[in-house]
Amino acid sequence: MGPTTMSEDDNPTAAMLAIGDELLSGRTKDKNIGHLAEAMTLIGIGLKEVRIVADDADAIIEAVNTLRSRYTYVFTSGGIGGTHDDITADSVSTAFGLPCIYNDEAMTRLTTHYQRRGIEFNASRQRMARMPEGATLIDNPVSTAPGFVIGNIYVMAGVPSIFQAMLDNVIPTLKGGVPLISETVECPFGEGDIAARLGEIQKAHPETSIGSYPRFSAEGFRTQLVVRAREKADVEAAAADIRSMLEAMTAH
Amino acid sequence: MGPTTMSEDDNPTAAMLAIGDELLSGRTKDKNIGHLAEAMTLIGIGLKEVRIVADDADAIIEAVNTLRSRYTYVFTSGGIGGTHDDITADSVSTAFGLPCIYNDEAMTRLTTHYQRRGIEFNASRQRMARMPEGATLIDNPVSTAPGFVIGNIYVMAGVPSIFQAMLDNVIPTLKGGVPLISETVECPFGEGDIAARLGEIQKAHPETSIGSYPRFSAEGFRTQLVVRAREKADVEAAAADIRSMLEAMTAH
């Protein structure tokens, strides 16, 4: 959708920063971006940008500072474990100009967690309690080591089950917007057959955003047309026009 | 891995820019980033950064201009079809300060393609021949409509089968680097048990980069340790030290 379609200026916005060499080497296929995208759509927060950067302090700091100045919320994944390549907490602290300290509450939770299991709470495990001074914790029901919030940055784990559990704890604390309503119309034609008429329908319904998603299969191109808007009536009106267009084309 | 590990300064670098509202709404889960990441790793080009932006001209222009000034190659996906929401060609043209024109060779290919199939080569389909003046084509063996190269930007389709086919055509034209060799060591311990010793092994092998990737399962945490370097001997030496560490831990 281009600049002519509906404004989302009054809705909160978000960006995601996925951190990790393994995502850029192809070793790990990210699963958190799509999950966050769906979750934001459901609560009416517009995910506007995603970046993936390496476990590199300069890259993380630059991305954090750019994104936090632009969007209502920034969510990060990855790099908060206890090994030498986990530098997210340090980098986010530097981005905010804050010392990276051992958070008291996180130390308490981790001490209890490892005591119960009879596992040594060694220096590496203690590293997982480090975060910028003044950060608040994001609960981790899976493996205890918490994420944290500082400013408008939500720092979460990269392991998908933990990322998702942390996000579940974060979402009720966010100021959501008006969720977009969407309707998908299956189109048996390729984009080239519908583009001109679809463009006219988009113009006639500026309060909606109409996306066109081709798929290539053995029978050639098929297209899914997705109408999105704040108001159900707007979605239905544009979708009705699309269906009329398709019926007229099929009748030919 | 942090700044203390091996330098990749002499290797070519790359970034990816995935374009499309559907990726940010969660409707479509990107499959091209992981594919590009694997391909770059194989040919020794360091993928340093990925961005996902909406079908928004300003966002595309800014990302294109930032990334093309930083990296050897920039690969884009999405937004090159014939519908109103396909604005990649226009945005890339604007980023380069070039007019967006109907490329002669692309028009010829598309004319032939649609003539053969008895399909009208209408204005919407002709839009797929638009690209910055001076661009060269990237062949599309799947559905003819070409991608294009302008400067160090490679503009490709978002449909995964077409993206992959286009990338196959692009790769032989790139200046590759020295591919990283990697070895994965399965570790039956969580990161907290190995972090200190692993950090020492990383320090003892600065020519390698050692990544630590925890997985959470019913039995608790397991970790995959991945050693990467240019030279096989370096990988093997670090992997041997890791295996010795694990054997000593298991013997306890």
Image (cartoon, coloured by chain):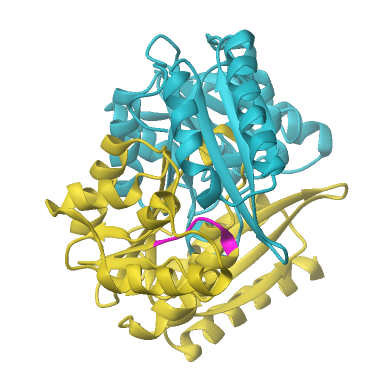
Chain colours: A yellow, B cyan
A37 with respect to B105 (left or right): left
Q: Residue at x 82, y 37 (%)?
A: B117
Q: Which residues are magenta?
A: A156-160
Q: Is residue B134 above or below residue B62?
A: above
Residue B30 colored magenta? Answer: no
A131 with respect to B164 (left or right): left
Q: Residue at x 42, y 49 (%)?
A: A124
Q: Nearer the viewer, residue B19 or A145?
A: A145
Check the image and name the residue furthest to the front. Answer: B252
Residue B55 point in image, percent of width and height: 42, 53
Q: Nearer the viewer, residue B103 or A234?
A: A234
Q: Residue at x 30, y 74 (%)?
A: A105
Q: Residue at x 23, y 68 (%)?
A: A135
Residue B3 point in image, percent of width and height: 33, 27
Q: Nearer the viewer, residue B250 or B99?
A: B250
Residue B203 point in image, percent of width and height: 41, 24
Quarter of the image with the N terminus of chain B in it: top left
Q: Is residue B1 visible?
A: yes
Residue B78 point in image, percent of width and height: 54, 44
